[in-house]
Amino acid sequence: MKKFEIPEYYKSSIISEIKRQRKDEDPRKKDYSPTELNYGNVIFFIARHFGFCYGVENAIETAYRIINENPNKRIFLLSEMIHNPGVNSDLKRKGVKFIMQPDGTQLVDWNELTSEDIVIIPAFGTTLEIEKQLSKIGIEVYQYNTTCPFVEKVWNRASELGKNNQTVIIHGKHNHEETRATFSHSVSNGASLIVRDIAEAKILSEIILGKKNTDEFYRIFEGKYSKDFSVTADLKNIGVVNQTTMLASETQEISNILKETMLKKYGAENLNLHFADTRDTLCYATNDNQQATFGLLETNADLAIVVGGYNSSNTSHIVELLEEKFPTYFISSDKEIISKNRIKHFDLSTKTIMESKSFIPNKSKVKIALTSGASCPDADVENVLRKLLSFYK
């Protein structure tokens, strides 16, 4: 895989060495068990796979290269480069302006841009509507496009489904940049619908089987379906794709639910006419990170710490998995660890920052599971490791 040039301050000598050793020992990633670092009073279980993925490294390398090569030009990002506060803050310090917030709220009016400006499309990609807006201004859309190739793979698969008159079911968060982009590209070729989770997939199944009426569909999925969507016509032939940062196991479960639904409605002999196999849209990095998280769940850790941006979808799913077994603390950096007895962390259920005391158990030997999301620099993980070590001899 290509090696990217990213700023040195995002790298970690400790984490890099761990990853190098694991890659040498297990190049095909057959072993997802964590690496154990034993410091005596504290033992760390470091996840087998975490940190910057291909798409993120490509986006970061491109952004910093553009900054260095264009010192006299105005440089804009459509929205956050990746969902990491440290990286985005660094880009802002270097003079990069953000056109939109992650939810699509406009920060810079389109009228303020000129054809001389540089606009970087982030790793999440963007909508066809925004591409047309940039072209109208005279800005070259594809010159500074860092859309992740795995996101583009999803778009290509959705395009194939649409051209075959198959409705595209998108497993994703409808307000996430990537899902908004995927939906935009998908509806250009055919009917499309966003499904958030397994609960919504089961509701959709009942609608397809006639157990719920069409009025409920339009109420429950309001704002998540393409224009002129017809329940009777557009749910006869479907295929599932996903926002690449969703839980791979959840995407598979949603696909299984809908496949079983079409089997019940049309019979095994007609299944291929009504359901498309789309397992090839799962992102390798998301899958590896999640498999490595399952590896952490096999340990006897006392607690887990996950490092990453609080609006990072893939990171939040790692937290959800670990919370099933361990007290889990979701932090954006080592600065959230105030002392051995106090930590500030993000609570997924309330979407708020909370503070916990005595988060490290008073034991002679403490075991800590440590990982991060795909948009977190390895340096941030090392800083957390060092901060925790500073509490011990």
Image: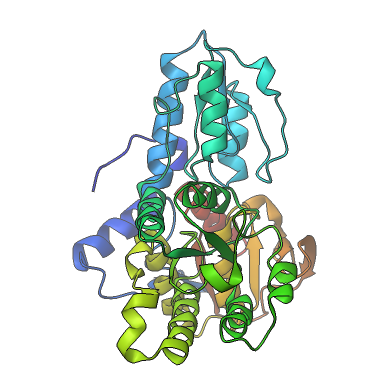
Q: Is residue 393 visible?
A: no
Estimate the x, y position of residue 76 in percent, counting from the top left: 57, 24
| Frontmost residue, 138 versus 372 | 138
User: Is residue 57 found left or right of 132 in the rendered image?
Assistant: left
Q: Residue furthest top?
A: 72
Residue 104 sits above or below residue 107 on the image: below
Residue 342 sits above or below residue 9 on the image: below
- Colour mapping used in the image: rainbow
| Frontmost residue, 86 versus 21 | 86
Q: Where the C terminus falls, by quadrant?
A: bottom right
Q: Quadrant of residue 352?
A: bottom right
| Frontmost residue, 334 versus 65 | 65
State the residue at coordinates (34%, 34%): 5
Q: Quadrant of residue 339?
A: bottom right
Estimate the x, y position of residue 376 in percent, counting from the top left: 51, 51
State the residue at coordinates (53%, 52%): 183
